[in-house]
Image (spheres, rainbow, N blue to C red):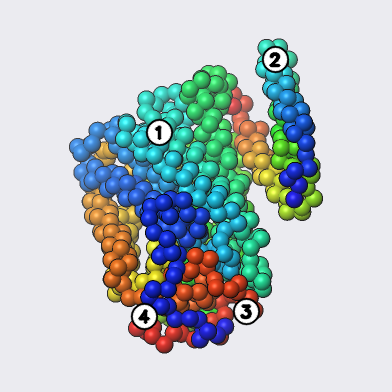
Amino acid sequence: MSEHVVSTKLYYAIWIALLVLTGVTAGVAFIDLGPFNTIVALTIATLKAVLVLLFFMHLKYTSEKMTSVVVISALFWLLILLALSLADYTTRPLGVN
Amino acid sequence: MNMATVVNPVTERENYLNQEYGVRSWLLTTDHKRIALLYLASITFFFFVGGLFALLIRLELLTPAGDLVQADTYNKLFTMHGQIMVFFFLVPSIPAVLGNFLVPLMIGARDLAFPRINLLSWYLYIIAGILMMHAVLTGGVDTGWTFYTPFSTAFSNTKVIEAGLAIFVVGFSSILTGLNFVVTIHRMRAPGMTWWRLPLFIWSMYATSIIFLLGTPVLAITLTLVIFERAFHLGIFDPTRGGDPLLFQHLFWFYSHPAVYIMILPSMGIISEIVPCFSRKRIFGYSFVAMASIGIAVLGFLVWAHHMFVAGMSIYAALIFSFLSYLVAVPSAIKVFNWTATLYKGSITFSTPLLYAFGFIGLFTMGGLTGLFLAALGVDVHVTDTYFVIAHFHYIMVGGAVMGYLGGMHFWWPKISGRMYPESLGRLAALIVFIGFNLTFFPQFILGYLGMPRRYWQYPPEFQVLNVLSTAGSTILAVGYLLPMAYFLWSMRYGKHAEPNPWGAAGLEWMTPSPPPTFNFEETPLVTWEAYDYGNIDLPKEVPVER
């Protein structure tokens, strides 16, 4: 296992990065980017999630096959949620959604 | 397997129950068996609270007029009945009680992988339970157990946030239990206990844990969004702020439909243990039954929008979900056919656990088949939000899940308590439950088909006869539930001492004394046989049930 290989410095750096990204999300909310409003917000959110997964949840430092199985299935389940929900949103008749 | 090597119980032998005494030894225990008993006491409490609400609902519906309670009170009664029964009884019932007790015993481990996290999960359950009871006692909730928006976020004047928080917290209790089971089953199997030698109860616990881990976080997120929208007026679900109320239903049912399988899969696991034992045969098609559990866990995530066919979703998506819903019937049918094939030409003993298993197989089949009616788009339009739906899911959850739970409690009670329950009373109670259940819920199929809607406290007079039958049935059902509780308590003091393996059953849990010692086994077992090796197990000399 890889509990103590990461320096606390790195943890603080990631933490500050997450805070900065949160600030950026809040700041961008005041600027109207048209259709890019949602895209930018989701991109930043995804980036933050990746940082948490890689560093705080140690995915970067593990080579266990089981861990990859867990991560891949979690992502796959998210894909199920999005894909089947979009099956509704993309095929609703105009004017109803 | 040589049963003669098992040591006979000595009355004063040290076991997990008498090793330590005092409240502290229970509240700070990390023994999975003691935590199982803590859960047993807690979920039994909530079962009776939820049952009380059910009886009040049935009493109100005894007459067509809304005369016993006011409409608002009725809304709260069915809401809190649902929330308490689903989140505080059915979801934790078998995993947290029997799963906690049996998973380490069945795989030959000393405890779960994370004993302290196991205790933490019970404390989370208790914190959630206190929150829920506080919400109940200080005004209640009236949104329906489903928290549908926009009513829950914009209109209801009841304790929505508090109940939502309670369910949020209890969800984490489930997640921790699921995590513990997955790691335990992967890491802590005894030497020789390969995946294909695992008891089917373990397979079903594994499948249930997958749903706990992948589904419950979505429920937590959804309830958080409801709470945020209600408290801070965000525009997630509110169309006037750019939200979509159907998004709530998508997110809610993404967890809550698989939650049905959280309730039924553990019961299926119990039936897969009981049927081979009391027909003295290896289960028919072991690997198919095992894989059907995993199949149900996965397919269960692909069908959620069949709860939304009339809610205004796209008809094309509805077609997809209707088709996918039919698929779940395949692994479910595999299980039912394999249990009946196991019984075929078996040497059958009509013991109490097997009577509950028979009840399960019949009632689950009825509940499952009526589920196909509801998955069919055309029929669903006719019966949506009627008593047909109520009858359908009670056949699954009460006729299926609770029957399985009671069967399992009787089957493993000698192991849990070290005492035998009175067999003839047990069989009587199983019969009362079966009769009471069908009298309560079968009329509701007819009522629903005739058009009686759910969630109203009044109804047209022509529906009264069937409603009176249903209410009468619910009182019989209540007797059937109180009886086992009474004789289980009685047997703890006066019951006959149980042998290590009173049923002559296969499985590692039966090869250690009843009740087991704190660390389960005197020495780590070495498994050299297949599961359900009934060809090589003799019945004990003194059989507690006449054949």
Element on which disc 3 rests: loop
Extreme-top residue of the structure? A31
Query: Which numbered circle lies on residue B544?
Result: 4
Looking at numbered disc 2 in the image, what kind of residue is underneath it?
Answer: Gly
Element on which disc 2 rests: helix
Looking at the image, is B196 positioned above or below residue B152? below
Q: According to the image, label 2 marks what residue?
A: A27
Query: Which numbered circle lies on residue B405?
Result: none
Residue nearer the viewer, B202 or B377: B202
Give the quadrant of the C terminus of chain B.
Answer: bottom left
**In the rendered image, residues at marks 4 and 1 fall on the same chain:** yes
Looking at numbered disc 4 in the image, what kind of residue is underneath it?
Answer: Pro
Q: According to the image, label 1 marks what residue?
A: B143
Give the quadrant of the N terminus of chain B.
Answer: bottom right
At 67% from the left and 73% from the top, the residue drawn is B192
Give the chain of mark 4: B
CA–CA distance in space, label 4 to label 1: 49 Å
CA–CA distance in space, label 2 to label 1: 36 Å
